[in-house]
Amino acid sequence: MAAQTFAYELVDGVIVMTHGKASPTDDEWRAHMDDLGRWRSAVRGCLVYTLGGGPSAAQRRQITAVWPAGQSPPCALLTDSAIATSLGGVISFFLKNRVKMLRPGQWPEAARFLGMAESFGPRARSIVQGQASRLGLPPPP
C-alpha cells in the first residue's frame, strides 16, 4: 500500500488539510471527494498547508462536481512552494473563488481570511502539526 500523501479533517466548518510533496493517489482523492460530498453543506472554508503537493489536473476537475464554479468556499493556502502557489491560482480560476496565498506561519491571517476568530489560527496550526506528524512530515512553523 502506498504511503498516505495528505490528511484532512473538518473543524468548525473549515477543512484543515496538510499535503506533503506528492499529489494524492486516486484512491485517497476519491475518499476525499466522498467526504466533501457529505460535508458540503457544513463547509464554510478550507485551510491548506502544503510542502508542494496538491491535486493533479484530473483531481482538480473533480472538485467542480462538489462545488460548481462560483459556489466553493474561500481557501487559505499556506506554502513556500512556487508549484503549490501556482496550483492554488489554477484552482482559484477553476472554481472562481477566493484563494489567499499565505506564507507558512501566517495562521492568524488565514483565520481572519476565512471569517474565523483569530484564535482559530493557533488551533489550525496544532491540527496541522498532528497531521504532519502522522504523514511523517516536518512540523509547520
Image (tube, rainbow, N blue to C red):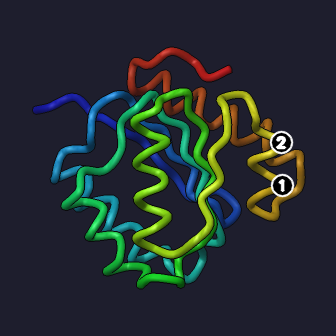
Picture coordinates of residue 40, whole percent (x, y): 50, 78
Secondary structure beneath dot 2 equals helix
Q: Nearer the viewer, residue 85 or 130?
A: 85
Q: Is residue 27 left or right of residue 118?
A: left
What residue is at 30 percent from the left and 35 percent from the top? 5
- Outermost residue on the left side: it is 1
**Amino acid under disc 2:** Pro
Q: Nearer the viewer, residue 37 or 91?
A: 91
Quadrant housing residue 4? top left
**Position above or below: 102 against 41:** above
Q: Is residue 76 left or right of residue 37?
A: right
Q: How many marks can you see?
A: 2
Mark linked to residue 112: 1
Picture coordinates of residue 59, whole percent (x, y): 24, 60
**Position above or below: 102 against 129:** below
Secondary structure beneath dot 1 equals helix
Picture coordinates of residue 79, whole percent (x, y): 56, 33
Image quadrant where one finds the N terminus: top left
**Position above or below: 84 against 56:** above
Quadrant housing residue 106? top right
Image quadrant where one finds the C terminus: top right
Give the residue at mark 2.
108
What residue is at 46 percent from the left and 32 percent from the top? 82
- Outermost residue on the top side: it is 138
Q: Are marks 1 and 2 in contact (CB under 8 Å)?
A: yes
Quadrant housing residue 108? top right
Mark linked to residue 126: none
Q: Nearer the viewer, residue 40 or 134?
A: 40
**Amino acid under disc 1:** Arg
Picture coordinates of residue 37, whole percent (x, y): 39, 77
